[in-house]
Image: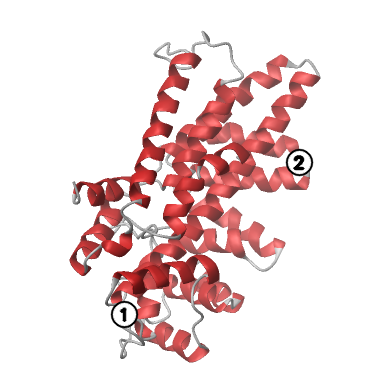
Amino acid sequence: MGVVLSVGALALLWINYDRGLNEPKNEVAVPPNSPRPITGLIQEPKKIITSESQVKETITQLSQKGLPPLTNQQIQGYLTSNDRDATCLIVGSRLSKNPELLREAVARFTDNPVVQLEMALHGPTQEERQAALNAFKTHDPQNSLCDYLDSLSAFERGDFSQAAGGLIQSLDSGTLQDYSLTLASGTEAAYLSAGYNNTEAQLFALFDSTQRNQDTTGKMGAVADKLGELRDQYIKNNDMDAAEPTVTIGLDIGQKIQSQENPSFLSSLVGLDIEAKILNQLDPSTPINSAGQTADARLKELNQQKNQLQSLVQKAQDLPISKMSDEQMKDYTQKLRSQGEVSATQWWLDQNK
């Protein structure tokens, strides 16, 4: 995790200073009780962004101060205009730092995994976080993030047996989904209803979704670190039979992070780093998959992918989002929703060849 953070500095600079951050996917499949398309209580904009310098100023303020605060009246107006549905309650709780709104969401939308995941990550008490994690596992059982969060919780409690069990179970789980993009439309609507204009609201939503993605990516990095500590302890005790499965699990964690639907630059780099760190500990000629690919061959693939991502980020720094027209911004965010950050960034660069 430490290695990739230095490698990922370019990506974070693109994320936090001179570009649009992750934007919600285009009507992704969401669980039962997820809200209908959100509408805002539109007021007169507080200010209009009309120039490149003003866009840059807004992005700089986001990177330095975070999201602008909303008043209680603005939050309540947003909630009322959207019938206090699941997404609005989550977004309202996050923007107002009011845990009671998150508790309301959990009470009203018990079988919604997005609600339960938010409580599992940001609940005000350990008891509420653990109960929500259990519910998240029940309502989204094929999501490998369930197993990773459960294992991390067990590691933190010192229950290494349960932690190992959860990681073994994760091998049979499906796609990792952290819903970081799903809630961004709600954040955008909240700022629209408070009187901000479309460009500002989009930037705020992208920033918020990136922060969410960083939260979950950090958790997965922590799981990989704990797994590495466990593997080192097994090796120190000369228990190679116990150490061997940790290699398989670690490779799987890295690959699942990389194979997320529309991953961010940061999560891609973290996934690459987790997998590469394990491969570097193996004999280069060791077969690491059913196709007989060696550790050395896979490492070369990972290095190539990392170089491509770094190159893309570097080019994006030279062509910031502040240079986009309103129409290009609209197209860019649509690409983010449907194809992800990497594809959207490549599209923007292609527009300026």
- Write down the quadrant of residue 151 in the picture: top right
Please give the name of the residue rendered at 35% of the width and 74% of the height, measured from the top-left corner.
54
Residue sitting nearer the eye, 23 or 62: 62
Colour scheme: secondary structure
Q: Position of residue 12 (x, y in %)?
A: 48, 52
Q: Residue flagged by tag 1: what amino acid is it?
A: Asn
Residue 298 image offset from top left, x and y in percent: 44, 20
Give the number of the mark in front: 1 or 2: 1
Residue at 41% x, 48% y: name it.
264
Using the image, tell me which numbered label, if any, was put on residue 311. none
* Image location of residue 169, percent across then percent down: 57, 34
Horizontal arrangement in the rendering, residue 322 relative to residue 244 (left or right):
left
Q: Which residue is mark 2?
A: 159
Which quarter of the figure has residue 192? bottom left
**Amino acid identity at mark 2:** Asp
Which label number is shown at residue 197? Answer: 1
Towards the viewer: 165 or 205: 205
Residue 178 visible somewhere in the drawing: no
Q: Residues within 10 Å of mark 1 (few under 14, many from 20)?
A: many
Mark 1 → mark 2, Cα distance in angstroms: 49 Å
Give whichever of 279, 9 is nearer the camera: 9
Residue that appears at 53% across and 33% down = 273
Q: CB of mark 1 within 8 Å of CB of mark 2?
A: no
